[in-house]
Amino acid sequence: MRQPANAFDLSRAGALSSLLHTYGGANPQVLQTVLGQAFSLGAQTAVVEYRYLDADYRNEHSRFYSTTFRRYPSAADRLHFFTAPIPPELFRPDRPARFHQLGYLGYTVLRPVPAAPVGRTMLAPPPDLADHITCRAPDRVNLLGEPLELTATPFIAQDAQVSRCAQAALWVTAYYHHLAHGTPRLLPGDIAAAVPTDLALGRPVPAEGLSVFQLSAAATRIGLPALVYKLDDLPGGESLPRIACRYLNSGLPVIAAGGGHAFVLVGYRRVHPGTAQERIHFIRHDDEVGPYQVVENFLLDDYAPWQYLIVPLPAKVYLSGEKAEVLGAARLTTSSADRGSLAAHQLYAAITTHKVSFRSTVLKSNDFKTGLERRGVPDPVASIYRRMPMSHWIWVVEATDRAARDRGDPCVLAEAIIDATDHLRDLHVLAWRIPGELVQWDPDEDRLSRRDLTAVPPLGSVAGGPVAAGTLSHADV
Amino acid sequence: MSDTKPGRLPLNEFATPVVSGLEEDAETVGAPPFDAATAAQITSRMREIDAAQQRATATSRDVYLTW
């Protein structure tokens, strides 16, 4: 009987090269990146799970690899990485294999396709990037009967037959939404079938690439209708970083298209905030290179100029971030101007002099409510928000003190909460807080309710982590 | 707000209301959310955003992602 798995001691010289030689096939670059990242994470052990029935590869096999003259096995292997050395009891047949205390780093499925070996991959991000990856989701794994968990951003390399870069980008997005939000699990064949092939010449299989239009249409058909931004023709006041960071802050992957390629932005980091050297480093999954690639300057990127951003959204987020921000900024600006208190007028003055910027994040209202304590929201405010009826998805438009934000301090001075399903021709703000006052609009009665507040200190953001640069000025609304 | 609105049980000796913590403002019933000038600015900005989306759609058929 063939053994079910092998353990590799990665601390031994040549172990990684041996794996790359065994599995790299005719196109080893992506696997080389994955192995290198695992090693950088401190992987000392790799366990190869043989004859792994991977749903994604099995689906690709059914759709394409079972139809060719050249034979391809229908089962894959899966490679798991651990930080701990190989425990000796792993080789004792009278004891169950135990992995849960070995520092699980993730896995990569290895297709038995020499031209495209890297299949579904969940690998922990590099430590220096971990806090900046905003699109991470928990995944559960079973290895020889042992349940394991990790939080990562899904990755897959295109196989160039069922999927090209655009389909791989959609797969990453769809699997992430499945893990993070419970949307249906979609396999490569499902995504290929969602592409409207009557909108272009050529054949769906072998895949020949997609237009941005087809990519967007496929996103709609898989239940994640996309907003599409043409980057050289954005509305005034908007920019690539502003738009991308708005959705990344919301934990929504952003597909970027440029140079004939599509890749997925999964996070970003600001460097030198508040200085002339301030820059945004995007972090992307590039299916032709590997996961968690840092783009230090998107203007000088290999795929520059980036031409489009495509943002697949949960179906019931009807309102775009740009529109939510217009509405929320208008509400906070006019309310702070109208409120007859010194603190509110100080906010109004800060808005009009650009010391305050607006930041918009879409999230589930239950997550907003459960996160109030963590963000240090005082009880009188938290108790009102927690009891307030809200739509499932809400946009939270925050007025943030730019200087405090750049220092990394709590910076939210006010916020407006917007129903992500609201009617585009009758937009209301569900609730807002400015200094001294919290107001709720009741859509059933079409009336406002209020409460006077004592001073609330600057709060942490609903987006947590990094903050996008730029402001939406008072003049814009 | 009436306690007998559809979807809410009438209050009786067994029920205690959970308060919202807010005071209702009867003067605001049916009031427009923004003054006319702000509403016009919002509408104008929304149209600008919609127009950019439409222009993006119009050209998106010509950009191929083939890698």
Image (spheres, rainbow, N blue to C red):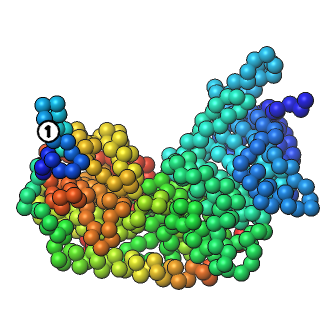
Mark 1 belongs to which amino acid? Leu
Classify 10 Å Cα crowding around label 1: few (below 14), some (14-19), many (20 and above).
few
Query: As rendered, which of A148 and A129 lies closer to the eye?
Result: A148
Q: Nearer the viewer, residue A37 or A195?
A: A195
As drawn, is A424 to the left or to the right of A265?
left
Q: Kindly give the residue lying farthest to the top in the view shown.
A: A94
Q: Work out whether residue A108 can be spotted.
A: yes
Residue A159 lies, in percent from the top left, at 76, 60
Report the number of numbered marks.
Answer: 1
Query: Is A444 located above or below residue A307 in the figure?
Result: above
Q: Is residue A92 left or right of residue A390?
A: right
Give the percent coordinates (x, y) of residue B40: 23, 79
Query: Does A14 sit left or right of A294 as displayed?
Result: right
Residue shown at the point (34%, 54%) measured from the top left: A391
- Residue A209 in the image: x percent, y percent? 70, 72
Find disc 1 in the rendering and name its residue.
B11
Quadrant of image for the N terminus of chain A: top right
Q: Height in image: A12 above or below A438?
A: above
Residue in the image at 42% along x and 61% along y: A317
Q: Is residue A174 above or below residue B39?
A: above
Element under label 1?
Answer: loop
Give the residue drawn at x 22%, y 38%: A379
Q: Nearer the viewer, residue A150 or B30?
A: B30
Apparent side of residue A60 relative to residue A248 in the rendered image (left or right) = right
